[in-house]
Image: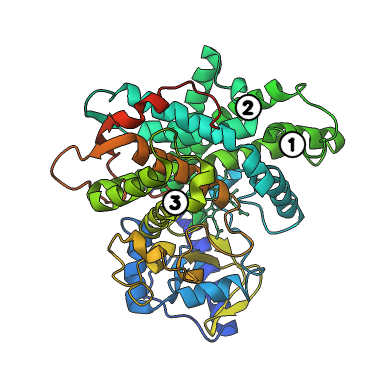
């Protein structure tokens, strides 16, 4: 045995001793523990997590109950799999659970936790959340950016139509849908002119898209060093090297974007004037440079791009896949669109209240395939109780939304795709939680719903659809943070002739 081996064995032993000591202290202090499977030394329950995490946790919950304690290496984890426990988490315990755990990827990609999604619950989180809510997600701002969404959707439809104007053609949907959601968010953040017009800018945007995809890949792959700190010393599987490269690359793109926007605007924000998000942040920087630093701006642009693009695009892809497998649902939606709109104009967001079946399809897709199956991890900032069980400070709380959405105790025939279930105006409260609940719930849900609604309604209105073979479209989930489809969606698509004259018209803001 050489010196290096001896060194690592000593380190592991020290960590194990510290861990067991802590566990002993902890067990004495907290009497009413949630049920927990038998665990192994050092790794705890990590060996029980094989395949998609939400599935493994659902399986364990059937045996150990809807409030289950696990240990991932040195970290305590609580898994919630019932709507009543969710309610308790995000009402009575909402503030206590409003923290986020720190993972290694967060150190690199959230500029040390100054991004909204990773920030601890406190003043900085409140300030950034307020700015985002006011400047991006308020009803007034959502309305202001309607034309951005509608123009981008029209470009997307035209581009698709070029490939299937006369006859059915086989089309790859994933890159197109990803491009659509990326363009919408990027335009709202920075103005399209700043990244998408020149060839060079376009290249940079494509490189950045690739970086985001890789970030999803790295953060989705579980890094055991998050739970067994000794593994950090050897950079297990080169995770940190990869994270460092991604950090450097994305920082370069984001800094470049900020530099281009600087000078375009300075001074205080004029009330009622909607500016791209970067300009808002830069004008705040002009008055408080030490608080609204470049890093804070970059961290939050990154958050918006990571949280706001793939989540929406995977949902559109799942919804289209479900519609291809259920042509009766697709026909019903199309008949409603045709009846209400006719053939002389395209659907637009103002039609949302009059075409509620499309929203039912979206809800049903999000129920079966939530883009964040375990929400985003929470962490308790104090000791608390959930369902009568003691939960210690510093426990990671995972809410298995995917399993709750499929719970036969609260959903009738939960595995069936039945958009009609959302037609009855029920209080879906804590059993339908694709956007989370409480203080940390998704601030972008209004924007996401609009983008998904418009894209889906337009695809149904403007094209005939068929599967590429007689077989149903596969619905297994692949690897990735946002639970993408395993197989990227391919479909047979043909422009509907009766709407083609509107589709091919000039690409101007919809009336
Ligand atoms: C289908 C689309 C989307 C889904 C399913 C989704 C889902 C979620 C979920 C489950 C959370 C965590 C809630 C929790 O902690 O309990 C979250 C947080 C967040 N989402 Fe979304 N999201 C979507 C779209 C968007 C969009 C379009 C944006 C912005 C452009 C966005 C921005 C954020 C941000 C910034 C957070 C962090 C909030 C915080 O920690 O305070 N999301 N989202």
Residue 375 numbered mark, or none: none
**Residue at the spot 49% in from the left edge and 77% down from the top edge:** 84
Across and down, in percent, residue 167 comes to 22, 25
Q: How would you rate the neighbour count of disc 1 (Cα within 10 Å): few for under 14, some for 14-19, many for 20 or more?
A: many
Q: For the residue labelled by badge 3, is the local secondary structure a helix, a strand or a loop?
A: loop
- 215 in relation to 191, above or below: below
Q: Residue 281 has which mark?
A: 1
Instruction: Examine the rendered structure and indicate whether residue 486 appears above or below residue 39.
Output: above
Task: Determine the image quadrant of residue 272.
Answer: top right
Judge whether 164 appears above or below 313 on screen: above
Q: Earlier in the sequence, mark 1 or mark 3?
A: 1
In contact (CB < 8 Å): disc 1 and disc 3? no
Q: Residues within 10 Å of mark 2 (few under 14, many from 20)?
A: many
Q: At 51% across and 53% down in the image, what residue appears?
A: 353
Q: Is residue 210 visible?
A: no
Q: Nearer the viewer, residue 28 or 217?
A: 217
Whether residue 205 can be seen here: yes
- The label nearer to you, 1 versus 3, is 3
3 or 2: mark nearer the eye = 3
> In whole angstroms, how far apart are the C-alphas of marks 3 and 2?
30 Å
- Is 449 on the left or on the right of 357, as rendered? right
Residue in the image at 30% along x and 23% along y: 163
> Which residue is at a point 41% across and 64% down the rendered structure image?
423
Q: Position of residue 64 (x, y in %)?
A: 37, 78
Mark closest to the chain's N terminus, 1 or 2 = 2
Circle 2 residue: 191
Q: For mark 3, what is the residue?
A: 355
């Amino acid at each position: 045995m050489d010196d290096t081996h001896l060194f690592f064995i000593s380190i592991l032993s020290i960590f194990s001793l510290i861990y067991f000591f802590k566990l002993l202290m902890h067990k004495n202090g907290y009497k009413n523990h949630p049920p927990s499977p038998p665990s192994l030394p050092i790794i705890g329950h990590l060996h029980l997590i094989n395949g998609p995490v939400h599935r493994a946790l659902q399986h364990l919950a059937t045996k150990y109950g809807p409030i289950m304690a696990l240990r991932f290496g040195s970290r305590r984890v609580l898994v919630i799999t019932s709507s009543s426990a969710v309610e308790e988490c995000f009402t009575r315990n909402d503030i206590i659970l409003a923290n986020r755990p720190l993972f290694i990827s967060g150190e690199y990609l959230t500029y040390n936790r100054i991004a909204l999604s990773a920030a601890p619950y406190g003043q900085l989180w409140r300030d950034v959340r307020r700015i985002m809510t006011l400047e991006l997600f308020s009803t007034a701002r959502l309305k202001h950016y309607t034309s951005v969404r509608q123009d981008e959707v029209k470009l997307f439809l035209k581009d698709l139509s070029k490939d299937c104007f006369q006859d059915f053609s086989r089309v790859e949907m994933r890159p197109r849908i990803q491009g659509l959601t990326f363009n919408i968010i990027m335009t709202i953040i920075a103005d399209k002119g700043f990244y998408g017009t020149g060839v060079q800018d376009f290249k940079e945007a494509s490189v950045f898209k690739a970086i985001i995809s890789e970030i999803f890949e790295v953060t989705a792959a579980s890094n055991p060093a998050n739970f067994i700190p000794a593994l950090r010393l050897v950079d297990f599987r080169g995770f940190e090297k990869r994270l460092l490269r991604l950090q450097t690359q994305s920082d370069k793109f984001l800094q470049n974007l900020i530099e281009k926007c600087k000078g375009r605007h300075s001074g205080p924000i004029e009330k009622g004037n909607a500016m791209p998000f970067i300009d808002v942040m830069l004008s705040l920087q002009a008055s408080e440079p030490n608080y609204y630093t470049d890093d804070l701006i970059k961290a939050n642009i990154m958050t918006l791009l990571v949280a706001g693009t793939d989540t929406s695009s995977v949902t559109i892809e799942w919804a289209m896949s479900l519609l291809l497998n259920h042509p009766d649902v697709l026909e019903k939606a199309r008949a409603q669109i045709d009846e209400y709109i006719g053939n002389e104009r395209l659907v637009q967001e103002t039609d949302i209240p009059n075409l509620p079946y499309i929203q039912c399809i979206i809800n049903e897709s999000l129920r079966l395939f939530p883009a964040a199956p375990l929400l985003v991890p929470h962490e308790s900032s104090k000791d608390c109780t959930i369902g009568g069980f003691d939960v210690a400070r510093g426990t990671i709380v995972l809410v298995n939304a995917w399993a709750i959405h499929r719970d036969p105790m609260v959903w009738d025939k939960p595995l069936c795709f039945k958009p009609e279930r959302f037609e009855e105006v029920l209080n879906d409260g804590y059993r339908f939680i694709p956007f989370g609940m409480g203080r940390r719930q998704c601030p972008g849900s209004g924007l996401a719903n609009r983008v998904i609604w418009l894209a889906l309604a337009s695809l149904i209105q403007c094209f005939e659809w068929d599967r590429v073979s007689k077989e149903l479209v596969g619905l297994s989930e692949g690897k990735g943070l946002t639970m993408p489809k395993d197989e990227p969606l391919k479909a047979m698509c043909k422009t509907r002739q009766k709407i083609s004259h509107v589709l091919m018209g000039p690409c101007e803001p919809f009336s």
